[in-house]
Amino acid sequence: MHKPRPVYLDLTGIRQPLSAVVSFLHRISGALLFVLLPCVLYVFELSLADEASFARMAQQPLLRFALGGVALFYGYHLLAGVRFLIFDLHRPGLYRYAQVSARLVLLGAVLVGMAVVSALW
């Protein structure tokens, strides 16, 4: 008997575990960091031109907000990457901490972002 394949799959209705969400966001943050790297390097080059250009760039709130976002992506990507490296050790009993470590990664990324934004403002 042939079962018909689903025509429409509602992806918003599927509830993923927090570990899967952290993994997906790790991939997204890595792709965004790769795409944003030329922009960050260009802004860095402009800020090193002379003191006036650095002062001019330091006064732009949109640029500070964007740099805070990039720092948030870097912090998240670093913390999630360390989490995945630890889980790649395949130690017995380590996977029972998957949900707790996923929450810690998200909390740590928010704290890193807040620290960078507060330093920029």
Image (cartoon, helix red, strand yellow):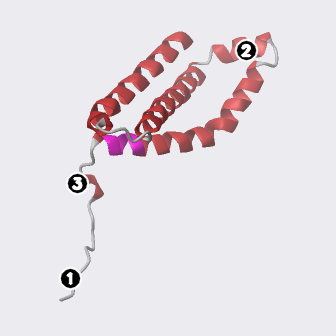
Labels 3, 2: front one: 3
3D distance between C-alphas at marks 3 and 2: 48 Å
Residue 100, given in percent of the width and then of the height, sits at 28, 30
The amino acid type of the residue labelled 2 equals: Phe
Q: Residue at x 36, y 24 (%)?
A: 107
Q: Is residue 35 above or below residue 107?
A: below
**Drawn side of residue 60 relative to residue 103, left or right:** right
Q: Secondary structure at mark 2?
A: helix
Identify residue for label 1: 3
Please name the predominant secondary structure of the magenta segment in the image: helix
Query: Which amino acid does the dot numbered 3 rest on?
Result: Gly
Q: Give the percent coordinates (x, y) of residue 101.
A: 33, 30
Q: Where does the N terminus fall, quadrant-wise?
A: bottom left
Spatial CA span between label 2 and label 1: 65 Å
Numbered circles on residues, count: 3
On screen, 8 above or below 33?
below
- Is residue 86 or residue 62 the one in the foreground? 86
Query: Which amino acid is tagged 1?
Result: Lys
Query: Can residue 102 be found in the magenta stretch?
Result: no
Please name the residue shown 47% across and 37% down the image. 85
Q: Return the mark for residue 54.
A: 2
Q: Earlier in the sequence, mark 2 or mark 1?
A: 1
Crowd band around label 3 with a 10 angstrom C-alpha radius: few (<14), some (14–19), many (20+): few
Report x, y in % for residue 42.
73, 31
The magenta-colored residue range is 19-23
